[in-house]
Image: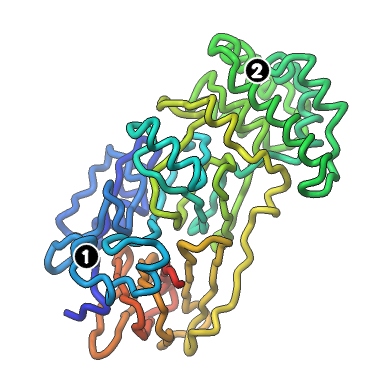
Amino acid sequence: MSSKLFRLEATYQNYAWGKIGSQSAVAQYAAHSNPAVKINESEPYAELWMGTHAKGPCRKTDTNELLNDLIKKDPTNMLGEKIIAKFQSKDELPFLFKVLSIEKVLSIQAHPDKALGKILHAQDPKNYPDDNHKPEMAVAVTKFEGFCGFKPLDEIADELKRLPEFTSIVGDDVAQEFINNIKPNAIDDSDDDKSNRKLLQNVFNKVMSASDEVIAIQGDKLIERAHSNPKDFNKEDLPDLLIRLNKQFPQDVGLFCGCLLLNHCRLNPGEAIFLRAKDPHAYISGDIIECMAASDNVVRAGFTPKFKDVKNLVEMLTYNYGTVDDQKMKQESFERSSGAGDSVLYNPPIEEFAVLETTFEKSTGVRHFKAFEGPSIVITTKGNGYISTEGVKLKAEPGFVFFIAPNTEVDLESVNQDFTTYRAFVEA
């Protein structure tokens, strides 16, 4: 088989928040790709990992060799000299590609930047297993909802006025200071903007520092208000969101630090968001393609039984604030492909990765891709087709994952109009 293009077997993770059994796209992909995988209909299947991360590395399908080992044997041809020089590794990809199938809310979390990642890993390697940053991008495969970034400040001020439970958590002095002194239209990086961020940090700190007992009492009152007086809330869907997430995590601080402070984001299939380091977020439901820098560092805030590092969390966040639209990514055309079908690029403002979506809804046939400078991983999510290069032609079916070496031209050939692939790649 070609060393330029070959099948991979991905690793799956059974985290508790995943969709159960064959309802999960992760389970469907894993089982279709590898007939030895038998779906347990009572188990959650949360994430499919495609990459070289130590917690879930891929293996070459026909030989069972670790992708890391294959790269280590021939780093120049598997990564490319420019990628090796840029990321200083001869056995790892700089990105981790995933599919997520989300049944229950994930923890509200943020990820450190590179400088903080090194510090946290040195101080606490158990909770921070590597020293990298972890910016993320999520592309909706089905209808998706999540939390992304702090709401506009005037929305938060309005909630503090409307909801006595929120004010009880924050305290009258901090609440009034926030309401009276925010400048919602401040210019980025101005003195007013810096003041806004400090005011927001004070509110967030009060929420995160509240005792479990206080959160439980005020949380119960907030849920009662959501049931009995939904018009007290400033967003029509907020009462239902609170009630739903309280059933998953009763009396949790996430009701306040998530539902009341963070944007409730809804994406349709094909829409994407970019989540910068040090910005809070969480996924609530749906299936997504996710790509990130190769790290597993997480600083958690709410909706989790796991370790919450409140001190580092409060200190590290950027306290950026704004609307959901500020974080949605624009689809870009991709000029290095041609032929049948369509390719759109999701290109976040970081060095480690970009993601290319290719579909054939409008026309079936062959789509050609010029060579990329760096390595790629491709997954088929729907339909049937083929992927080929230099005399090698491989079936591409749902859940099939492929590695493409640098400087390799490939063709995608659709068998039907549903044929859909996502390709994560890195270039210098």
Q: Secondary structure at mark 1?
A: helix
Judge from the rendering whether residue 280 lies leftward or rightward of residue 73; answer left or right: right
Residue occupying the far left of the picture: 63
Q: How is the image coloured?
A: rainbow
Q: Amino acid at mark 2?
A: Glu
What residue lies at 37% left-to-right and 70% top-to-bottom?
376
Across and down, in percent, residue 373 comes to 41, 78
Quarter of the image for residue 178 reads top right
Residue 368 lies in quadrant:
bottom left
Residue at the image position 30 percent from the left and 84 percent from the top: 388
Report the disc number at residue 72: 1
> For mark 2, what is the residue?
224
Determine the residue positioned at 57% across, 50% down.
Answer: 276
Q: Is residue 67 above or below residue 216?
A: below
Q: Position of residue 142 (x, y in %)?
A: 50, 56
Q: Position of residue 344 (x, y in %)?
A: 54, 74
Badge 1: residue crowd in 10 Å (few <14, some 14–19, many ≥20):
some
Callout 2 secondary element: helix
Task: Decide which of 158, 137 is in the foreground and name it.
Answer: 137
Does 251 sit left or right of 396 as displayed?
right
Classify 260 as above or below 38. Answer: above
Mark 1: amino acid: Lys
